[in-house]
Amino acid sequence: MSLLNTAEQFFKALNAHDLDKVVSMISPSANIRTPIGSLVGGEAYRQWMEMHFRALPDFTHEIRGLSAESGDSVAFELHAFGTHTGPLELATGVVPATGRSLDVSAVDIWRFRDGLIVDYHLYFNLLDFLGQLGLAPNP
């Protein structure tokens, strides 16, 4: 299976809220970096996604646009979208539901070892994310 196919399976499980499957694809020592913060391992990723699912119960990810594979790495564009109907926990505090919809473009770059994700770098425009929730001016 190609690494992009693995990513598609990952997001199929994530969209189904099958976090056991998602965590099984991430190394316990994986380095996960996002604009919101850094995490280590699949269980930390589970907790991070559970927070997102509480805030955005319909949170969905779609791989769209460009993708590339090289050796043990894959990079791809995606969109994450959902409706903010629950509390969102940020480093600055809890943001109550705004009822607003999100559609955020992002890029993921993953590196694999022994079939598991060991580096997971997520890039998106945090100001755009917050702006869509009405928490910052839209860029």
Image (cartoon, grey):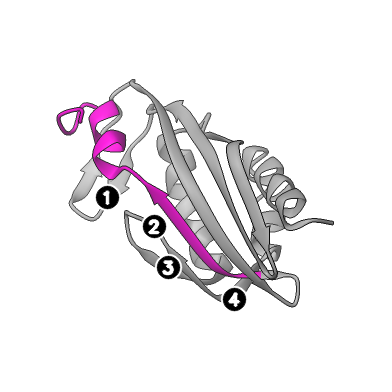
Location of mark 4 (residue):
28
Q: Is residue 137 above or below residue 93?
A: above
Q: Which residue is depicted at the point 45% across and 54% down?
A: 122
Location of mark 3 (residue):
39
Say what amino acid the circle numbered 3 marks: Leu
Q: Which residue is depicted at the point 44% across and 33% down?
A: 56
Q: Is residue 91 above or below residue 52?
A: below
Give the number of the mark in front: 1 or 3: 3
Spot occupied by residue 31 in the image (x, y as percentages of width and height): 48, 72
- Find out whether the residues at labels 3 and 4 contact each other: C-beta distance under 8 Å: no
Spot occupied by residue 67 in the image (x, y as percentages of width and height): 62, 46
Would you say 134 lies left or right of 115 here? Answer: left
- Find out whether the residues at labels 3 and 2 contact each other: C-beta distance under 8 Å: yes
In space, the residues marked 1 and 2 are separated at their CA atoms by 13 Å
Q: Secondary structure at mark 3?
A: strand
Say what amino acid the circle numbered 2 marks: Thr
Q: Secondary structure at mark 4?
A: strand
The tag earlier along the polypeptide, 1 or 2, is 2
The tag earlier along the polypeptide, 3 or 4, is 4
Would you say 106 lies left or right of 130 here? Answer: right
The tag earlier along the polypeptide, 3 or 2, is 2
Quadrant housing the C terminus? top left
Quadrant housing the N terminus? bottom right
Q: Is residue 30 magenta?
A: no
Location of mark 2 (residue):
34
Location of mark 1 (residue):
90
Would you say 135 lies left or right of 97 here? Answer: left
Q: Nearer the viewer, residue 65 or 100?
A: 65
Q: From which residue to which does the magenta span run?
A: 117-139
Spot occupied by residue 13 in the image (x, y as percentages of width and height): 70, 45
The tag earlier along the polypeptide, 1 or 3, is 3
Say what amino acid the circle numbered 1 marks: Leu
